[in-house]
Amino acid sequence: MGDRHLTVLVPGLSQAMRVCRTSGTTYVLQKLINRGAKNTLQTDSFESLAFSMFNFHQLGGHGLPVAAVSYYGITDKRPKGWCLRIDPAHLEPRLTKLFLIAGKPLAVTKDEANSLIAVIQELYQEHEWHVHALDPDQWYLIVPDDPGVITTPIAWAMGKDIDSLLPAGVNASLWHARMNEIQMAFHASPVNTIREAEARYTINTVWPWGSGELPELTEQVWRRVWSDEPLTRGLAKLGKSQLNFVPKNTVEIIEHSSCGSDLLVLGGIWSVFDTSEPDHTCAHLRDLEQRWWRPLWAALKARVLNSLTITDVGLGAVTVRNRDVRIWPQWPRFLTSNK
């Protein structure tokens, strides 16, 4: 039987570990990290890490086509045209600057998303805009042609002054004007009237990012991928990997392990690790410890896996081989106890 390798990508893991470093929630994970060989990553975001893990190298002046690949990952449909994300957001004035708030703090509902998307569709019906809310806080825009802008990923812009982060490129002024038009239209929406009355963040803008066409991947990097996250699901489909949703625990993964390299993605771009809520973050780390790290440690000891790599932007890539741990023949007990 050949070598069996598993890589586990956990977006936000290193940041969560810093938040919970004194809580004792990562004992086995720390043992894996301490015994593993560490490699520094040449990436600065979850998106760039995900693309690099599928050997995708961007050409030209555009950013990574996050929107197109994620759309394909969710719908299994190739977008007909150019795709970009226009996620709902809130601009908060602080003195002379505007700061971006998006994602979980907005708690956008499905009805609110549908109502505001209808506003956008009406504004730009002559431009053949097609907007889809595949998740209430993740909106996808499909347009016929290249929008001609270079954008900033929303994760980089959240909580920051947006002045230097707005769309750039040949059509920058056009997109600034469109963002202003959408802001004015959203201001008049009943959605924001209700939100303001309830002292909630208004949804007063959209943030364009992740623009591009659906690329082609020429090689199969991963034999099998387990993921619920849209971007890595889309990359797995393009890369001709066997694709599955994430199981409840390691049993399915170990049972299907065979010669080759597999990828497990735990979490997504809106990471389960919201470090503004430490108790919530530490509870997720405890769950990972019980459901994943303990059984995977045991599988290494039993030589069911030849090696395990744990990766995240802040962590790098840490690879533990079965020779780095002692033999522990009772590993099935740890797998089945988490069913």
Image (cartoon, rainbow, N blue to C red):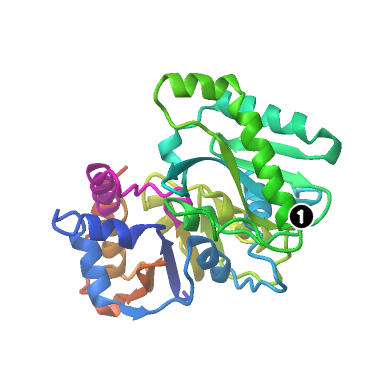
Identify the residue at horizontal 39%, vertical 44% (top origin).
Answer: 248
> Front-most of 19 and 272?
19
Vertical side of 63 occupied by 69: above or below: above
Vertical side of 86 occupied by 250: above or below: below
Identify the residue at horizontal 78%, vertical 40% (top origin).
Answer: 129
Answer with the quarter of the image where residue 313 lies: bottom left
Residue 310 within the magenta-colored segment of the rendering = no
Answer with the quarter of the image where residue 33 lies: bottom left
Give, as a single range, the part of the protein colored magenta.
265-290
Which amino acid type is shown beneath numbered disc 1? Pro
In percent of width and height, residue 209 lies at 62, 54
Vertical side of 58 occupied by 70: above or below: above
> On the image, numbered disc 1 is attached to which residue?
147
> Front-most of 104 and 92?
92
In percent of width and height, residue 180 lies at 65, 41
Counting every numbered tag in the picture gives: 1
In percent of width and height, residue 202 lies at 49, 31
